[in-house]
Every structure is written in C-alpha cells, then in structure tokens.
Image: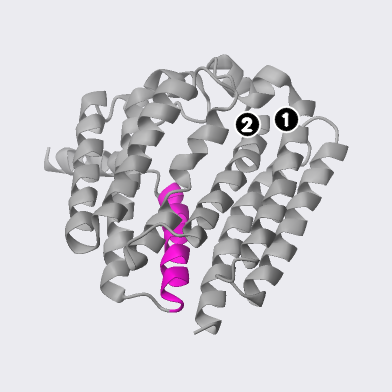
C-alpha cells in the first residue's frame, strides 16, 4: 500500500513537470538571458538574473498549464499530444488552472518586488496574451494564429532588458522582433510534419488551409525577413561585429534550409528546417551574449 501511494505520488509529480513543458521553458529562459546580458553590456547582476530566471520559469510553466487545460479537447484528438496529463486525467483541468494561476501570481510578485513593475507586467502580459489571444481566440479560428500568437514567446528577452534598464528601448524591441519573426517558420515547419494531426483536430494551421506549397513559400519569406531584421539590429549600435557575423551565418543557413524545403517534394526537409530553427535561436542569443561580453 505504501509502495502504491509512493508510486502514485511520483506519477502525479512527473505529470505536473510534464504539464509545464520544461524544454520550451529552457528556450524562453535563454532568450531572457540574452536580454539581461545585452542590457548590462556584460555580465548582469546575479540577484536580478536569478529572479528573472525563476520568475520566468514560474510564469512559463503556469502559462503552459493553463494552455493544456483549455486545449484538452484538441490535445485528445492529436497523436502528438494525446498522452498529456490533463488528457489522461492524471491532472484534473481545474487543478491545472489553479496551478497556472498561482505560478503566475508568484512570478508577478517576485518581479514586482525584487526587480521592477514593468518586468512583472510584461511577464504577466505574455501569459495573458498566450492564453487569451492565442489559445482562446486565434488557435482555432485563424491561419495567422502562430504569427500573432508568437508575440507571447517574444516577450522574455524584453523582460531581461527591462529588468536591468527599467524601460523598453529600441534594442528590446529588436530582441522581441527576432523571436517574433523566428516563430512562424519554426512552427510552420512543425505544422508541415503534423498536417494530418492538425486537420484531425480541426485546427486551421497554414498547411491545412492553404496547402504545403504556400506554406513553404511563407516559411522562406520569413527566413529572408529574419535575416534582414537581424542585420538591421547591428545599425543601432547595441550589438557589435561578433553579433553581425553570427546573424549573417546563422541567417544564411536558415534561408538555405528554407530553399531546400522549397525544392524538395512534399514535406521532405521540413524536419531538418525545424531542428535547425531551434539551433538558430540558440546560436543567435549566444552571439548576443558573447558580443555583450566582448564589448565590456
């Protein structure tokens, strides 16, 4: 009996960890770290950094929990998501909601009391946008769900910047824009691979509505726009030559993967582009961090 209870407790704990989507959180935290380093022009204050990362973890975890509670019907219909803990009934939907709300409340209080109110407001705003605008309003109704909804995931680097400066400056807007324009090609590549899954769940992702060919064109367009945007960032003077070289090489490779996807039949090359897009974001923000350290 004791062994059974321990096993049940471990199952629930693992379910709550899964509910938070740890891999996505790590990616968001790394972009926040880029904002912290860039604003500090070097190594950021340790206390501020820890608070931003802890609060960011809590807020992102809470947003993911709220999302899975609201999307449980969709998740049940898709092969990729039908083993999520809310779908399986390990975590009741209302428990996921309470969990998500509490985590975001704690995140807001941490940032507001230990960093600044602007950073706290941006973090809470990202969660509200993700839950209410993307999950509730756009995901089930618009092919532009990922384009507009991507704004939520682009907030963390701005939070890193405002945590140090206390204000939203032009560099923060560029950081936001990099993640914002990166999001569509990243998710559309995934959507190409999961086209049938999204169709089964009646989600109007771009490949489902306009087809594979038009989705490929949109992916390539955004990779070109992303290279242009990241190159323009250098003109602000906030970043240096290390960043410029990084953005040129990484952006050029992104376009290469987009062109390869266009030339390949059907969805061949979509997985390669999707995996590279993850690496791209890591490369770009590593370049920002290294550039900030060298400029000190």
At 48% across and 48% down in the image, what residue appears? 154
Marks 1 and 2, Cα distance to the nearest angstrom?
Answer: 9 Å
Tell me: residue 147, above or below residue 245: above
Left or right: 171 with respect to 54? right
At 41% across and 74% down in the image, what residue appears? 40
Say which quadrant the N terminus sits in: top left
Residue 240 quadrant: bottom right
Q: Nearer the viewer, residue 210 or 82?
A: 210
Asked whether the residues under the numbered discs 1 and 2 touch, taking CB atoms below 8 Å apart as contact, a structural biologist would say yes
Q: By what rule are the colours in the image chosen? A: one colour
Question: Can residue 44 be found in the magenta stretch?
Answer: no
Q: Position of residue 84 (x, y in %)?
A: 39, 31
Residue bounds of the magenta highlight: 23-42
Q: On the image, numbered disc 1 is attached to which residue?
A: 215
* Residue 19 in sight in this render: no
Residue 128 quadrant: top left
Answer few, some or many: residues within 10 Å of disc 2's Cα (few below 14, many 20 plus, some between 14 and 19): many
Residue 229 quadrant: bottom right
Q: Nearer the viewer, residue 52 or 98?
A: 52
Q: Nearer the viewer, residue 229 or 21?
A: 229
Q: Secondary structure at mark 1?
A: helix
Left or right: 132 with respect to 138? left
Q: Secondary structure at mark 2?
A: helix
Tell me which secondary structure the magenta stretch mostly adopts.
helix
Q: On the image, numbered disc 2 is attached to which residue?
A: 191
Left or right: 59 with respect to 291? left
Tell me: residue 44, above or below residue 74: below
Answer few, some or many: residues within 10 Å of disc 1's Cα (few below 14, many 20 plus, some between 14 and 19): many
Mark 1 or mark 2: name the one nearer the start of the chain: 2
């Amino acid at each position: 009996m004791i062994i059974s209870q321990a096993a049940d407790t471990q199952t629930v704990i693992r379910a709550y960890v899964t509910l938070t989507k740890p891999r996505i959180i790590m990616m968001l935290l790394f972009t926040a770290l880029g904002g912290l380093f860039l604003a500090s022009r070097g190594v950021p204050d340790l206390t501020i950094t820890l608070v931003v990362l802890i609060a960011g973890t809590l807020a992102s975890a809470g947003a993911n929990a709220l999302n899975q509670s609201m999307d449980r019907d969709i998740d049940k219909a898709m092969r990729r998501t039908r083993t999520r803990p809310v779908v399986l009934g390990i975590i009741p939907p209302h428990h996921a909601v309470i969990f998500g709300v509490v985590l975001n409340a704690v995140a807001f209080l941490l940032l507001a009391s230990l960093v600044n109110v602007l950073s706290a407001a941006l973090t809470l705003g990202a969660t509200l946008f993700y839950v209410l605008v993307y999950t509730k309003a756009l995901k089930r109704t618009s092919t532009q769900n990922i384009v507009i909804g991507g704004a939520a995931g682009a907030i963390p680097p701005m939070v890193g910047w405002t945590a140090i400066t206390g204000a939203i400056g032009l560099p923060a807007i560029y950081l936001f824009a990099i993640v914002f324009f990166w999001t569509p090609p990243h998710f559309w590549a995934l959507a190409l691979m999961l086209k049938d899954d999204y169709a089964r769940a009646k989600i109007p992702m771009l490949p489902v509505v306009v087809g594979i060919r038009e989705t490929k064109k949109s992916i390539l367009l955004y990779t070109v726009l992303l290279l242009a945007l990241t190159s323009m960032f250098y003109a602000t003077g906030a970043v240096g030559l290390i960043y410029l070289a990084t953005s040129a090489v990484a952006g050029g490779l992104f376009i290469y993967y987009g062109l390869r996807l266009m030339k390949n039949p059907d969805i061949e090359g979509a997985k390669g582009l999707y995996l590279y897009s993850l690496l791209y974001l890591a490369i770009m923000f590593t370049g920002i961090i290294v550039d900030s350290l060298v400029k000190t």
